Amino acid sequence: MIAHLLGALVLLVALWLSRGYIIYQLEFIINTLSGARQRGASSIYGQGPYAPVDMEVLEGDLSVEGSLPSALDGTYIRNGPSPHPSLPPTGDFHWFDGDGMVHAVRIRKGTAAYANHWVRTSRLKQELRAKRRLFIRLGDLNGRGGLLLYLLSQLKERLGLKNSKDGTGPANTSVVFHNKQVLALVETDLPYVVRVHGDAHVETLERLKVGGKKLLGPWAAHPKKDPATGELVCFGWKISKPHAHYFVLDKGGCLRSDVPIDIPEPVFMHDMAITQDYAVILDLPLVLNPKRMAKGGPAWRFESRRAARIGLLPRATEDGRDIRWFELPALFIFHTINAWQEGDAVALYACVYDSIDLADVSGSSAHVEEIRLDTSSGKATRRVVSDISCEFPVVPACLVGRSCRYAYMAEVVGAERGYSGLAKVDLGAATPAAAVAGRISHGPGWLGGEATFLPRSQDVAALKGEDDGYLVTYVTHGVGGASELRVYDAASMAAEPVAAVRLPQRVPLGFHGTHIGEADFQSQFPFDIHFLPDL
């Protein structure tokens, strides 16, 4: 009897110790039989200009062609995905799935230094310790195989193989500077605080704590900073009800409000907009429903028969029921351009998709529209501003939530599967044909993405117009792999860069960045924060 009990105990211990191995083998079988391994290995997001880099680099005294304007003193930093080489994709791979990597160029008195840095997220550290991927990815959520992977991911949590309480996101989408802190953001987690040193070296400090208070949910990647008040106006979404929340951090980083917003189902809420009085919330029909995977479909699907809703929420409210919804036929927006009030109306400008396939975002095309929300009639109307294929729009930071004439965005030209130039769009143009006020081509073989606008001077009185400034962006050659930081003249949109910095490593195509001016750069919190352990 004792021998049988000991044998059973040994078997249970062996099963417990091998629980991870069993689950990982099941994942391997599922990904192989579903074809996900083969699809992941051949994904365009793992090749060419999208391909990840496999090391961190720090190098100063970079070669500069032209002259770096003094307005650029500080740091340009951009976020994007770059899967760690120790954690290659094991199944379907989506562009949004890679581990967050920030690329920083420190500029000082005409000189430049470069560093790249994997954000030390909880997800990355747990997976490196386990020497395998532990967390479900966006690319996994498709078909019956995806449903099985989702269930196995939940089982890993219950068996103690991973810990979601400390965060699950890759921090790979955007960078925001607020309250003397550089924040790396993604949709599904809290931001991570990173610090850029004087030589461009970057370190991860901590997962952000907001005044010791627990938020109703995670952040999304696109909070908006009010240029007049210094407030950071934020939102987030989650799978569980109430699905969305709106919150505000004052200029000192303290949580001023956190308001639940009741929407019918979880949707892909990537961006928002603000005016002086309103937060503009997007409830659009790119809907998450994991049950669809049981029928062989994707968890995320654009529901063309579902209305698109755009909400105006008074910024000072403490009650999410104060939101007022405006309905339109189905559309999708990854990125807003700007919004402002005109009498009884709110004018929202955005890059609009008539439909979207989240599994192949580079195969979908957006154009610039004005969506006018009339608060007196309750009606919403659409107007095509420009029909060029574009994304990643920006406006001057001082005009966020205020009327502006120009927006700058990455443009797709021809059959390219990437952004080969920049376009300057006149939002007030009478016709789409007259809307493009300037174009820049990065040159044959070169691809880029979002640019950041910097005014030529911080003295508004010294500026010749709202476009008197520079566009700063990374570009990468699709074949040779060379990368540069380029500075263009935003007023003239001349193709010849004002300056170009040759970078010591390829910068994969990525997402969103910001420029941190010299004064803000110097104000970053001193080294009294406990650093997260290195990899």
Image (spheres, rainbow, N blue to C red):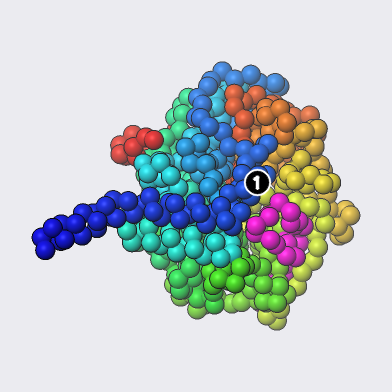
- Rendering coords of residue 379 (x, y %): 71, 78
Magenta stretch encompasses residue 345: no
Task: For the C terminus, give its image quadrant.
Answer: top left
Quarter placement of the N terminus? bottom left
Specify whether 111 is left or right of 17: right
| Mark 1 burial class by Cα count in 10 Å: few <14, some 14-19, many 20+ | some
| Residue bounds of the magenta highlight | 352-376
Which quadrant would residue 359 be assigned to in this image?
bottom right
Secondary structure under badge 1?
loop
The answer to whether residue 296 is above or below residue 177 is: below
Percent across and percent down for residue 66 are 71, 22
Give me the residue at 50% from left, 29% from top.
56
The total number of labels drawn is: 1
Q: Which residue is mark 1?
A: 43
**Which residue does the image show at 79% across and 29% down from the upper left?**
496
502, above or below 165, in the image: above
Q: Residue at x 65, y 25 (%)?
A: 501
In-image side of 408 versus 190 (left or right) = right
